[in-house]
Amino acid sequence: MIKDRDNTERRILDAVGRIVEREGFEAVRINAVASESGMSKILIYRYFGSIDGLLAKYLEDKDFWLNFDTSQLPQSDVKAFSKQIFRAYINMLRSSPALRKLYRWELSSKHPSINELRKRREETALKIIASVCELSGESFDRVAGISTLVTASVSYLCILGENCGVYNSLQIDSDSGWEKLLETIDFMFDKIL
Amino acid sequence: MIKDRDNTERRILDAVGRIVEREGFEAVRINAVASESGMSKILIYRYFGSIDGLLAKYLEDKDFWLNFDTSQLPQSDVKAFSKQIFRAYINMLRSSPALRKLYRWELSSKHPSINELRKRREETALKIIASVCELSGESFDRVAGISTLVTASVSYLCILGENCGVYNSLQIDSDSGWEKLLETIDFMFDKIL
DNA sequence: AATTAATGTTACTTTTCGGTTACAAAAGTA
DNA sequence: TACTTTTGTAACCGAAAAGTAACATTAATT
């Protein structure tokens, strides 16, 4: 019996991560975490209080914040700026199983930690929208509407892609479908901005 | 003990409906249905075979696209048609808790009934897209892309609206946010079609 | 060295779940 | 009437779930 609480906590959190990536947040249950981590479940209660506490800690450690470095983007060309933002958003979601599971979980859970995530996300989003407004001269509502249309659909399709390959004949579980979608998004920005 | 199988089946299916609207398809479990309906659970097995069978029965005639009348496809005004069909889709989703729960369920489940739904939905969608293509002169990929963008985002936002009030500063849990979004959709169609 | 606190193991209780068995009552049928 | 089938009730079973209690070991403190 080696006594090393930090190590134990890390093992437990790592186990949470594996479960989340594999099966989603809904599958993070006390027995599952215990067996996945190889640790006794009473340690989970002792160190994290509950599954909610464990998830809160996991979310805190893992960087699920929406953080874009807008300073790197082309400031003069609004269209290029917008296109790049959404490209980055798609890449982020498409490359991270855990993030997709988080977005899915948000659709059915009212976990307290989620509100914090949303607040921060909202702040970042509003900053980006504001800067597009400034660059393009469009109204806030217009830019917010377009952003919403694009990000919401991307979120939906990325989640759906894990269970379903085709949507409106688009191959959303492979690059080919996403290229077509990106093309559509680019086209839209060319037309409306 | 009154013997009336039809009545019993209806009670069970009604119970499923209440559970779905309240908690979603994930919560439709044998014990839950039994206690919600007041019927013994063995009757569920006898009459529906399993929870899967019960859900398959419940799902008949529940989906928007399945009930879409493809005989009324657009004759002249493509823009008006496009705007109208997405309006109808939004109204349907916004007014039906069960349909929202179905769309949410699809994001995490691989239930056999879902594949059937998707296949039929896909057929309907392709018919609509094809006729819009013909009238507008746009390419299939373009129309499919736009449709995907709109329907996917609407689905996402309707589901999210049950747990979250604001998205990109849009009030998605009230009419005000949806009016703005509809305006954006209309604007987009005016510009690109 | 003795005591205390922290860490970890094991086994237990209790609840809930899906699924089944056994049986009773009603309705149809010979 | 005697029987068979259908419809329904109630109790039961084993597995898996959350949560807890009791105890053992190590580390820190005095």
Image (spheres, coloured by chain):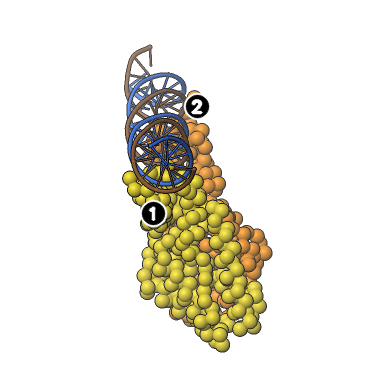
Chain colours: A yellow, B orange, C blue, D brown
State the separation of the CA atoms marked 1 and 2: 63 Å
- Secondary structure of the residue carrying tag 1 is helix
User: Which mark lies nearer to you, 1 or 2?
Assistant: 1
- Residue bearing mark 1: A7
Q: Looking at the picture, which amino acid does disc 2 mark?
A: Ile
Chain ID at mark 2: B
Q: Position of residue C23 (x, y in %)?
A: 38, 19
> Which residue in the structure is indicated by mark 2?
B2
Residue B192 seen anywhere in this rendered image of the structure: yes
- Residue depicted at x 44% and y 59%: A101
Q: Is residue D18 left or right of residue B190?
A: left
Q: Amino acid at mark 1?
A: Asn
Residue farthest toward the right in the current orientation of the protein = B176
Q: Secondary structure at mark 2?
A: loop
User: Who's the residue at 56% across and 85% down the image?
Assistant: A75
Image-based side of A118 in relation to B123, left or right: right
The quadrant of the rendering that contains the N terminus of chain A is: top left
Mark sitting on residue B94 = none
Numbered disc 1: what chain? A
- Observer-nearest of C25 and B179: B179
Within-10-Å neighbours for mark 2: few <14, some 14–19, many 20+: few
* Coordinates of residue A87 in the picture (x, y in percent): 47, 76
Residue visible at 42% across and 45% down in the picture:
A43
Where B10 falls versus C23 (above or below)?
A: below
Quarter of the image for the C terminus of chain A: give it. bottom right
Position of A79 with respect to A34 (left or right) is right
Residue A167 as seen in the image, left or right of residue B170: left
Q: Position of residue A57 (x, y in %)?
A: 49, 55
Using a 10 Å C-alpha cutoff, classify the residue at mark 1 as few (fewer than 14 neighbours), some (14 to 19) or many (20 or more).
few
Asked whether residue B120 appears in the rendered view, the answer is: no
